[in-house]
């Protein structure tokens, strides 16, 4: 609250002062409740209250208490309410008549021009009553009664202001307790107003009232619903049936254009009658092709200066004089109206009927679809802002569709009923068991270890083999005397190699490191190998690398040292990722490296497999190529 | 075709009375009808009284000249549209066999007492017809054709060669009326344009200079100039008094094809703009400053164009009537019935008639709707 509320002491003082000023001393409170004198007294009390320049909440209650002196209970009883209402209605009437006599708008009556704030007595009175009603001090319907009286007493112009007040207090009026008391009165007020308004001239005000009703009543209120979906068939668009003399107007086209309205006014007929639909679609095609042939430019829209004061120029019905047709066809908003009508019409046709038998047939559906696309395309190119316009129309139609479905489903309330636990149901239906690890199998697996503690010491348990044991098959294959063919050699078994590398990485890091120099065969522990094979892998890899690099520095670009170093952890990382594909990559690289080296130096007989059979002297070369190729591959990856 | 055959034999299953000649005739007629071309359809737009019935004259490829009443066409069209969508055949008010070959052009000579209709054709003749006779004809349609005598008959001169040899008579591809000095201009096939005096029937001037035959001719009366468009790809401006060529315009700038031509020329009402329809598009020139305003490429060769106030209507070898501004922006493209349109003409009320292949005329209202579409019945011989 902006202004500080006055201290209660001064408040009381003021009241005393006012009661002194009172023109007619109040009759003894013991008199009959519904006497004129009593009413006048109440009016007097409120009149004086109206001139107080404070927010209503500070003094309203006191005013009522003062007006109804011998208050029987804390809440006013029936006859007290009645007399209060009577008095207030009379007061309102007096205020309005004095406002009318002053020649001002009633909602601005009493406003001083210089002080900006409003102190219109009528607004004040409404504020006070509204406050009282809201707090339940007086009967809740009272404010609605006053509003009804006020609208009935006022001219249409004033009603606009009054309605502005209603709209501003919409939140309060719509509160559950007030709404229940006053919804019928409010509905009656609004309907009376709508009846008084001209449908053609007061479109905006009508729309305001309808929007207010839509907000005021709950979303699923069906009292305003056209349950049966009856069309307003009396809405006939009249047009000239006989051609005028001369050819200034294409009369056939004129008739074609306006005959569309017959279908729009009663779409149900078109929907059920295929012949009518055929006629409509052929007529529409003519109209659309004419629209399409004459696209409008931005200038056409600007020519129509009436857009500025649309309020005044808005027509709810088309003007159908044939002389106007030429102008109308150049008017973007006219085209939009027709096209939007088409879209609404199509939406109706596409909507499902009560039973599935109704509704368009297959071929008709196709036609509707193509027509609709055509119409949308045309809407899009109408300036100004055709695309935006179409977008909003589509949005509105989409919403409308939701309402259609809502109606079709029997107008269900939108408020979800609070969830109630029905004891019978809960007991009858067994609760679905929840598994800690997602499903039954996983949970059992998890528990299995707990249930079988001695399984860890079980001698038959599958364990990780030692590397010496694991590499044995490969070592045997590597013995040249075994003469194993390439195809059956263990080193070509990628899974075997990958597993072995993983074991080596955990148990024998030295051996694993040899992988980058010698390939997979270098990883095999030396004690497994026959001495002549072993000799090839015995020299220290670090020295070899250095020598290789020295030799290579002339022939080719030196390999950066980091790559050599990085190679090992990377392989390890790939392995620990647990992905067999990734882990297999080093094997790939080995094979690829061989090819690579062969490509690079065709004269050199190289590669691990051939290297085995070569005399020892060749080993150096072999090593060199392998090293470089592996390094290169690391680079490549 | 089948319809024609069935017509001659009501009991079609009975082969005894088989008349092959009539069957052949029927087929030929149907073929002839479908391939007939209207080279020009013009409105008679000079009567002062707002006559509700608009008349239209058309020159056909079978050499006939016909006049149509638009209201009859509209009522016939709306009656038929319930039944079928194809263009209806309409009886002309009057039809004459004007030329021995195709008739290429037809123009009104707006004499207040006796308006004349001039036609020209492949036979190198220009003939003038009394419009009053064609406007209201009492002769039944079946007897028409040779019932009218031309008021004027002009023949193109033949060129004389060595030893007295004479060239064939060159055809007339287009004519234009010069009201100011009462003459007709003809664009002829011998690369010359001829100026004929209507009173005397004598050839006044010959405009010689184009390298190939002429397509079109237009008159700029205020400056006593004539503009011609030719197959050689140029338009020329001639002086009417001296007969000298004053300017050669090359509307087709980029010689993408060697064979580019100027098929139509038009001058607007203020006589300050010139529009040339070429093999590749439209080119508009300012006659005051002698410079090109814009060149617009079209999909199809342009075959006729005209000025409607400050807009240009153009048709070509596609079934579309385009409306352009003087700046070259396309305002609208209206589909029209003839697959290839050879002429567009405008009535003062704003309706336009497009005529072309198939013997079809499509009358389009101001708002772009099709008032009526009809085919013309030719002379049945």
Image: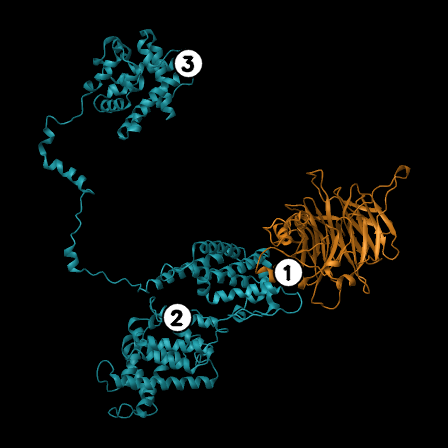
Chain colours: A cyan, B orange
Provide the residue designation for mark 1.
B365
Q: How many marks?
A: 3
Q: Is residue A429 left or right of residue B149?
A: left
Evaluate whether residue B336 shows in this view: no
Residue A212's disc is: 2
Q: Determine the secondary structure under disc 1.
A: loop
Q: Are marks 2 and 1 on the same chain?
A: no
Residue contact at pointers 2 and 1, CB within 8 angstroms: no
Residue lying farthest to the right in this orientation? B163
Residue A286: percent from left, percent from top: 56, 58
Instruction: Tell which of B262 and A37 is nearer to you.
Output: B262
What chain does badge 3 belong to? Answer: A
Provide the residue designation for mark 3.
A601
Q: Are marks 2 and 3 on the same chain?
A: yes
Q: Quadrant of residue B114?
A: bottom right
Residue contact at pointers 1 and 3, CB within 8 angstroms: no
Residue B125 in the image: above or below residue A108: above
What chain does badge 1 belong to? Answer: B
Q: Is residue B164 left or right of residue B368?
A: right
Question: From the viewer's perspective, is the residue at label 1 or at label 3 nearer?
Answer: 1
Residue B289: percent from left, percent from top: 76, 50
Residue B354: percent from left, percent from top: 67, 54
Residue A628's disc is: none
Residue B229: percent from left, percent from top: 76, 47
Give the Cα distance between marks 1 and 3: 85 Å
Question: From the viewer's perspective, is the residue at label 2 or at label 1 nearer?
Answer: 1
Give the Cα distance between marks 2 and 3: 90 Å
Q: Residue at x 45, y 72 (%)?
A: A205
Mark found first going from the N terminus, 2 or 3:
2
Q: Residues within 10 Å of mark 2 (few under 14, many from 20)?
A: some
What chain does badge 2 belong to? Answer: A
Which image quarter is the C terminus of chain A in?
Answer: top left
């Amino acid at each position: 609250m902006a202004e500080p509320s006055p201290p209660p002491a001064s408040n009381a003082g003021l009241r005393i002062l006012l009661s002194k000023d009172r023109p007619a001393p109040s009759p003894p409170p013991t008199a009959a409740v519904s006497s004129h004198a009593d009413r006048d007294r109440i009016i007097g009390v409120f009149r004086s209250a109206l001139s107080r320049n404070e927010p209503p909440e500070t003094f309203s209650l006191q005013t009522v208490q003062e007006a109804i002196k011998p208050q029987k209970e804390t809440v006013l009883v029936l006859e007290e309410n009645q007399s209060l209402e009577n008095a207030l209605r009379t007061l309102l009437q007096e205020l309005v008549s004095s406002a009318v006599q002053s020649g001002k708008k009633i909602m601005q009556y009493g406003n001083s021009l210089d002080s900006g704030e409003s102190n219109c007595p009528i607004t004040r009175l409404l504020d006070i009553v509204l406050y009282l009603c809201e707090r339940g001090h007086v009967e809740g319907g009272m404010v609605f009664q006053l509003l009804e009286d006020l609208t009935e007493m006022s001219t249409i112009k004033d009603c606009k202001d009054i309605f502005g007040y209603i709209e501003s207090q919409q939140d309060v009026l719509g509160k559950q307790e007030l709404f229940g008391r006053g919804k019928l009165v409010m509905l009656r007020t609004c309907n009376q107003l709508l009846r008084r308004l001209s449908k053609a001239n007061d479109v905006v005000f009508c729309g305001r009232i309808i929007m207010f009703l839509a907000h005021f009543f709950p979303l699923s209120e069906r009292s305003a619903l056209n349950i049966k979906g009856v069309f307003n068939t009396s809405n006939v668009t009249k047009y000239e049936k006989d051609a005028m003399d001369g050819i200034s107007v294409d009369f056939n086209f004129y008739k074609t254009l306006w005959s569309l309205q017959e279908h729009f006014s009663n779409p149900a007929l078109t929907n059920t009658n295929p012949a009518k639909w055929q006629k409509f679609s052929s007529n529409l095609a003519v109209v659309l092709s004419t629209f399409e042939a004459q696209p409008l430019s931005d200038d056409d829209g600007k020519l129509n200066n009436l857009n500025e004061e649309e309020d005044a120029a808005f027509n709810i019905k088309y003007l159908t004089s044939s002389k106007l047709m030429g102008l109308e066809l150049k008017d973007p908003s006219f085209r939009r109206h027709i096209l939007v009508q088409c879209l609404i019409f199509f939406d109706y046709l596409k909507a499902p009927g009560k039973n599935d038998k109704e509704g368009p047939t297959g071929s008709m559906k196709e036609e509707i679809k193509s027509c609709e696309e055509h119409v949308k395309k045309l809407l899009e190119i109408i300036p100004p802002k055709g695309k935006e316009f179409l977008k909003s129309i589509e949005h509105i139609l989409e919403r409308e569709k939701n309402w259609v479905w809502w109606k079709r489903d029997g107008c269900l309330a939108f408020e979800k009923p609070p969830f109630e636990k029905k004891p019978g149901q809960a007991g009858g239906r067994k609760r679905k068991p929840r598994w800690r690890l997602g499903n039954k199998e996983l949970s059992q697996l998890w528990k299995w270890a707990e249930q079988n503690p001695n399984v860890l010491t079980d001698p038959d348990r599958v364990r990780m083999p030692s590397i010496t044991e694991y590499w044995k098959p490969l070592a045997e294959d590597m013995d040249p005397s075994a003469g194993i063919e390439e195809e059956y050699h263990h080193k070509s078994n990628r899974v075997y190699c990958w597993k072995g590398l993983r074991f080596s990485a955990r148990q024998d890091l030295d051996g694993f490191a040899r992988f980058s120099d010698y390939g997979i065969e270098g990883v095999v522990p030396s004690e497994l190998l026959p001495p002549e094979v072993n000799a090839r892998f015995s020299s220290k890899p670090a020295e070899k690398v250095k020598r290789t690099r020295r030799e290579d520095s002339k022939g080719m670009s030196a390999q950066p040292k980091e790559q050599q170093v990085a190679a090992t952890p990377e392989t390890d990382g790939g392995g620990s990722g647990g992905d067999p594909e990734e882990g297999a990559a080093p094997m790939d690289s080995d094979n690829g490296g061989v090819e690579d080296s062969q490509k690079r130096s065709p004269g050199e007989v190289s590669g691990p497999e051939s290297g085995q059979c070569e005399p020892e002297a060749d080993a150096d070369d072999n090593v060199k190529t392998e090293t470089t190729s592996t390094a290169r591959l690391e680079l490549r990856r | 075709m089948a319809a024609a055959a069935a017509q001659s034999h009501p009991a079609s299953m009975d082969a005894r009375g088989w008349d092959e000649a009539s069957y052949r005739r029927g087929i030929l007629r149907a073929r002839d009808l479908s391939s007939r071309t209207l080279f020009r359809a013009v409105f008679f737009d000079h009567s002062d009284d707002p006559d509700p019935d608009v008349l239209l004259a058309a020159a056909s490829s079978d050499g006939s000249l016909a006049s149509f009443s638009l209201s009859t066409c509209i009522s016939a069209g709306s009656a038929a549209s319930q039944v079928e969508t194809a263009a209806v055949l309409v009886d002309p008010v009057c039809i004459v066999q004007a030329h021995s070959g195709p008739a290429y052009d037809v123009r009104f000579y707006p004499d207040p007492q006796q308006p004349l209709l001039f036609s020209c054709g492949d036979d190198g003749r220009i003939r003038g017809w009394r419009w009053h006779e064609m406007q209201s004809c009492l002769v039944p349609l079946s007897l028409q054709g040779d019932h009218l005598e031309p008021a004027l008959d002009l023949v193109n001169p033949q060129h004389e060669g060595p030893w007295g040899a004479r060239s064939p008579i060159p055809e007339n591809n287009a004519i234009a009326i010069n009201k100011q000095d009462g003459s007709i201009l003809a664009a002829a096939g011998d690369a010359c344009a001829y100026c004929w005096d209507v009173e005397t029937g004598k050839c006044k001037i010959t405009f010689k200079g184009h390298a190939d035959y002429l397509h079109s001719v237009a008159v700029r009366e205020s400056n006593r100039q004539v503009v011609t468009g030719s197959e050689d790809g140029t338009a020329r401006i001639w002086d009417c008094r001296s007969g000298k060529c004053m300017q050669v315009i090359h509307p087709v700038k980029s010689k993408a094809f060697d064979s580019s031509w100027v098929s139509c020329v038009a001058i607007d009402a203020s006589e300050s703009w010139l529009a040339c329809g070429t093999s590749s598009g439209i080119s508009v020139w300012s006659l005051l400053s002698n410079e090109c305003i814009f060149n617009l490429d079209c999909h199809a060769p342009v075959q006729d164009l005209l000025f409607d106030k400050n807009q240009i209507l153009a048709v070509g070898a596609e079934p579309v009537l385009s409306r352009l501004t003087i700046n070259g922006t396309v305002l609208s493209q209206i589909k029209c019935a003839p697959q290839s349109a050879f002429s567009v003409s405008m009535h003062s009320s704003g309706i336009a008639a497009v005529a072309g292949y198939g013997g079809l005329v499509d009358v389009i209202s101001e708002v772009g709707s099709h008032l009526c579409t009809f085919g013309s019945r030719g002379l049945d011989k």
